[in-house]
Amino acid sequence: MEPTNTDILIIGGGVNGTSIAMALAGRNMGKITLIEKGGLATGATGRSGAMVREHYLNVELVRMASDAKKFFEEWPKEMGYDLKFQTTGRILLFNESDAGAAIANGEMNRTEGVNIETLNPNTTKEIIPLANLDDVKVSLYEPEAGYADPVATTYAFAKEAQKNGVELLTRTPVKNILVEGGRVTGVETVNGKINAEIIINVTGPWANTLIGQNDVPLPITPIRVQMVHLRRPPKLEKLEHIIIDHTCGAYYRTDGTPNTLVGGEAPEDMSEIVNPDTFSLNADHDFITRFWNRAINRFPDFADAICRGGYGSLYDMTPDGNPILDESPNIAGLYNVAGFSGHGFKLSPITGEMVADLVTGQSKSPHDHNFFRSSRFVENSLITPARPYSGRAHQ
Ligand SMILES: Cc1cc2nc3c(=O)[nH]c(=O)nc-3n(C[C@H](O)[C@H](O)[C@H](O)COP(=O)(O)OP(=O)(O)OC[C@H]3O[C@@H](n4cnc5c(N)ncnc54)[C@H](O)[C@@H]3O)c2cc1C
């Protein structure tokens, strides 16, 4: 079979691959192809909590997240897409040990223009009256936060990219990235060879599988995480805020029905290193019990919930919990965009433009991709917050 040719090949049809395709499509870069081994959004994206918030612990991330939130509010209306973005409000609960950091981070976020309030237990109780707040000292409340539909978002980005000329190849696994004389020349797929001078590896937990023997592995670890689905009892039906419980690492987000998705980000929830090709997509019984018990501790009425199962998925974790957006130092033309560490959905519209800048050498985005350079891991300049929260594998 004759090889086909493209100028830029994006590997990975998640929310980040499609966002990059959409951003590059408007930049006169020749033929762009996006290739995905399954269907669109069938990786971490489709199983994402897809929460959209602005509160972060670093100024750069706050600014990216604020621009991303505006995108979710405005772009779908302007462009005629429905990303099903729901504003629910988001409350972060902190105990004594993190109260000082929460107050300082709330202040920093407000200085950056984020609509975020610092609440005491009494004012928190006014918003979530059925919560047991005995151990809560301080809360942060972002009334404009919410969640979107990650599948609808990815398909919208892909459709917009296609409208602007991007070719989409689904159900086409890439077997190898081809390298000659220190630069990429294309890929070998199950359907034959594709020549390309620029390859963008946006395969999340599979990023190192694709790099294979060609390059030094990226510091990305595939970690299995789990989500549990609870049907709220009638007393809790009005619980529609997203709750991030920093006292135990739990988070709760409704899905627009009386169901709540319960996730966990305590270190013990994120300790299972797996092979991304063989991990279990179902939730484990002990996780269901652990997450449900946390829910009951915070909202006693969850004891009457109905468990509707759960699922497993992957975080592509880096040592500082932030992504890599960079060209390989060893292989010209190979760009790696991975390691989103469980918070890459909301940032995706901004990431797409940052990567388009990286690849084209343009500076259209106000956000600097250099912040996410891969050399930070060897330069000992990790992205670390000034006021981190304790006991979190991911900030
Ligand atoms: C349970 C859970 C909850 C989350 N909640 C949130 C949240 O609330 N807010 C937030 O901002 N983020 C959240 N995230 C993180 C966010 O979902 C991810 O960071 C984001 O979806 C990653 O998108 P991606 O496009 O980089 O990767 P993926 O969606 O994993 O896409 C990578 C794609 O590459 C494809 N691929 C792999 N190998 C090959 C190959 N050889 N050939 C071709 N294609 C290949 C895969 O099939 C896959 O579709 C959550 C993640 C999980 C798992």
Image (cartoon, helix red, strand yellow):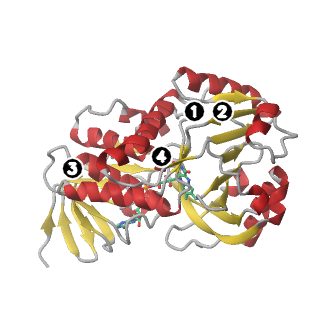
Which amino acid does the dot numbered 2 rest on? Pro
According to the picture, the residue beneath numbered tag 2 turns out to be 388
Earlier in the chain: of badge 3 and badge 1, it is 3
* Viewer-side label of 1, 2: 2
Instruction: Give me the C-alpha separation between circle 3 and circle 1.
Output: 33 Å
Q: Which residue is mark 1?
A: 384
Q: Which residue is mark 4?
A: 346
Tell me residue 90's x, y (percent).
63, 42
Residue appearing at x 33%, y 74% in the figure = 171
Q: Quadrant of residue 35?
A: bottom left
The one of 319 and 7 positioned closer to us in this rendering = 7
Looking at this view, is 291 or 133 the one in front? 133
Quarter holding the N terminus is bottom left
Which is in the foreground here, disc 3 or disc 1?
Answer: 3
Q: Disc 3 beta carbon < 8 A from ligand 1?
A: no
Residue identified by numbered label 3: 25
- Mark 4: is the Cβ under 8 angstroms from ligand 1? yes
Q: Residue at x 64, y 63 (%)?
A: 226
